[in-house]
Amino acid sequence: MMNRLFDAILVLTFVAIPYCIPSRLSAQESEIQLLPPISGSDDGSISTEVTSEELLGEELLTEAPTDFWTPWSTTMGWFNSPIWDFGMELGVNGSEGNSQAFSMMASGSFKRETEASTVEVKINYGKTQADGVETQHYALLDGRWDWNISPIWFLYTKTILEYDEFKFYDIRMTNSGGLGYHFIKNDRTTLTSRFGAGVSREFGGLNNEWIPEANVGADAEHALTKRQKLNLTVDYYPAWEEFSDFHIIADANWEVLLDEATNLSLKLGAIDRYDSTPDGALANDIDYYVTLLWKL
């Protein structure tokens, strides 16, 4: 059965190849002069040399390959490295002996920024064990896409996924979108505010319904020196029906460049997750971390 399926795919591939050739190439094939007239030289000898330009035509040689690869090169242009920023972080702490403890913090991020839009995704993962007992285990995914409508105004969409083994839900999803404004935006300092609306839902918890929410957010970034930078992101999500029901996610960190050649930095920070309705658990969770950050 698998052999027949493979043969069918192979036949369809060869049948489809002619249709993948650009139409412009087909249109110019009728104009190709394959064998130019044989000409004689002054000494009576006959020249039969045919150059590639005479055989295929100068215009076809210079333009057809470019047109053939244009769709592919345009698609791959989305991954051009100058507009991408990748980062990986890792921090580990532990002890063995009279007491056993292990703590780790891992993170990954990517950012694509152009004049028209900015896409940024961050993933944080933390786990802690003390004397064989797990005391912390969480994961946080934060993704945002901004579309610039002017030098200071932009539209945004934002998605947050939260997993915490010590919460009364499995995963909380928060989706929001709205309008943003840059109070300050230059090479050294950025200060941005956002306001929008969305919904959130706690899967596997006591309340599995979608809750309409507002979103008020702020982002700040400031380069203290050439090698030091401060970052802060805060998002406040109050329920539209009752503003006393809200949750907050904040991330603040300080980056210090250690080695410019390898783009290796030391990063100190904290992630604060506050829930006004913790369902019997503590309302506030603050995770401190010290990691090594490597940007590609």
Image: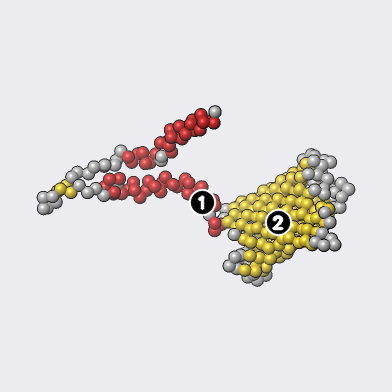
Q: Name the foreground residue: 219 vs 90.
A: 90
Question: What residue is shown at x 20% (from left), y 47% (from top)?
Answer: 48
x, y percent for residue 285: 81, 55
* Figure colour scheme: secondary structure
Asked whether residue 212 appears in the rendered view, the answer is no
Tell which of 183 and 57 is nearer to you. 57
User: Which residue is located at x 54 percent, y 31 percent?
Assistant: 2
Question: Regarding mark 1 in the picture, which secondary structure is present there?
Answer: helix
Q: Is residue 2 left or right of residue 24?
A: right
Q: How far is mark 1 from mark 2, CA to CA?
A: 30 Å
Answer few, some or many: residues within 10 Å of disc 2's Cα (few below 14, many 20 plus, some between 14 and 19).
some
Whichever of labels 1 and 2 marks the residue nearer the N terminus, that label is: 1
Q: Is residue 106 left or right of residue 115?
A: right
**Which quadrant of the figure has residue 235?**
bottom right
Q: Position of residue 67 (x, y in %)?
A: 41, 46
* Residue type for callout 2: Ala
Seen from the viewer's position, the closer of residues 138 and 135 is: 135
x, y percent for residue 115: 56, 56
Give neighbour class at mark 1: few <14, some 14-19, many 20+ (Cα, 10 Å): few
Q: Residue furthest front?
A: 97
Q: Position of residue 275 (x, y in %)?
A: 82, 51
**Number of the label disc, if any, that sits on residue 91:** none
Q: Which mark is residue 106?
A: 2
Residue occupying the point 67% across, 50% down: 143
Say whether marks 1 and 2 touch (CB < 8 Å). no
The residue to which callout 1 is attached is 77
Asked which secondary structure carries label 2, the reply is: strand
Mark yes or no: residue 226 visible: yes
Q: Amino acid at mark 1?
A: Gly
Residue visible at 54% across and 28% down? Answer: 1
The image quadrant where one finds the C terminus is bottom right
